[in-house]
Amino acid sequence: MRDPNAIDFWRGLALVTIFINHVPGNTFERYTYSQYGISDAAELFVFLAGWSIGIATRGRDGHPEPRGRTVIRLLSRTIEVYRAQLTVMLLALATIAGTALVLDNPLILEWHNAGTFFADPIQTIVGVALLTHQLGFFNILPLYVVLLGIAPVFVLIARESRTAALVFSGGLYLLSLIEEWNLPSWPGEGDWFFNPLCWQFLLVLGFVLQDWNRESDTLARWSRRLMPAGVALVLFGIALAVLEIRPDPLRVPEPRLLFTFDKTYLTPARLIHFLGVLLAFRAVYGFLAPRIGPVAGYLARLGRNSLAVFSMGSLLSLGGQLLRFWTGGGLLIDLTILCLGLLAMGFTAWFVEWRSRKPRPRV
């Protein structure tokens, strides 16, 4: 993936897929690739974030930028994502509360763990600020905040040794699987839906592979050789999904997370399947892009403005859920949600780019 448009294209596809999958039960959900495998768009989104970090932390001459600048760049992005999470959470809670008022249905206040906020706002607002209270379907950005926050550690280690960075990250990943470490939720019970202690490994893997890919053609050669294995993994994942074959967590040996398909802990089966997807589809962009020019351009624009588009998509998917609840759903409603969502995300991406180009008056 040396073409930056390819990275943006796949990230845009992940954003569209996440939007559709975050409106459960809709007609078009069955046509997303997450329904035909073990992994889904979340893995792609996090891996590409790591790949993008590798690109962003290098100067135009290809050499690593100064360490201090790298740390400041990543921490600045962390603050930006954190600010987006707080804004999205506020708007999501307002949407849920507003819908409950309009429909005169207080049960809507319980949607996606929002009930804790309305029942105990004093503690919960602290939890929102600490990222320990998350709404259902609004838990990717908190993961992203933590991953970006710890990314400087792995990036600086990788500057000295990519192997050391992978060993450190992989060790934390395996220990978290074996000991079932996770970050706690508060003030409610339970743990984070996306465990940062495990998902950090995918981010670091993306960063290290990008660094390796930039320096030599070895990764490209091996990915071509392993492409048949990737196709086999994809086909195997399709068979497991279609036949609904999943290991029973109560019947697998210990440590059980090594043998399940758990999304929270990014278990090895999901990770291996995702790597298979990468190998199987590594050359697809070069084939598709010239043939679906406008669609490829649309997806690439979404990917270039992923934070704003993801935030908008999250709110739109919540609106779609509430609209389906109010109307009972159906093909026409689902088609309306899909079309309005794609248009709104496209407009968001266009607006961000237009605003960044337009000179701003001084105040």
Image (spheres, rainbow, N blue to C red):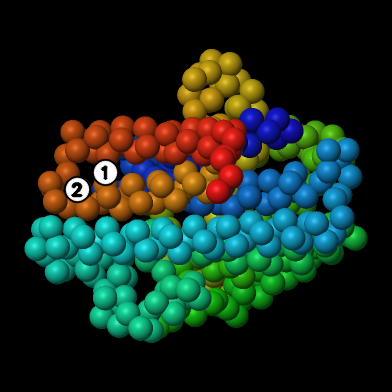
Q: Nearer the viewer, residue 247 or 295?
A: 295
Disc 2 secondary structure class: helix
Q: Quadrant of residue 120?
A: bottom left
Position of residue 315 relative to residue 126, above or below, is: above
For image coordinates 37% across by 37% down, the residue present is 344
The structure residue drawn at horizontal position 23% and vertical position 64%, both measured from the top left corner, is 97
Q: Decide: is 34 above or below 8.
A: below
**What amino acid is at disc 2?**
Arg
Residue 185, given in percent of the width and then of the height, sits at 45, 78
On the rendered image, what quadrant is the N terminus found in?
Answer: top right
x, y percentage for residue 109?
22, 68
Please provide percent x and percent y for residue 193: 46, 67
Amino acid type, label 1: Asn
In the image, residue 353 above or below residue 121: above
Residue 143 percent location from the top left of the image: 54, 63
Mark 1 vs mark 2: give the one in front.
Answer: 2
Query: Is 253 left or right of 251, judged from the image as shown?
Result: right
Q: Residue furthest top?
A: 291
- In the picture of the structure, the residue carrying the numbered disc 2 is 324
Residue 26 has which mark? 1
Q: Is 314 on the left-hand or right-hand side of 308?
A: left
Marks 1 and 2, Cα distance to the nearest angstrom? 8 Å
> Which is more toward the observer, 322 or 164?
322
- Looking at this view, is 344 or 55 the one in front? 344
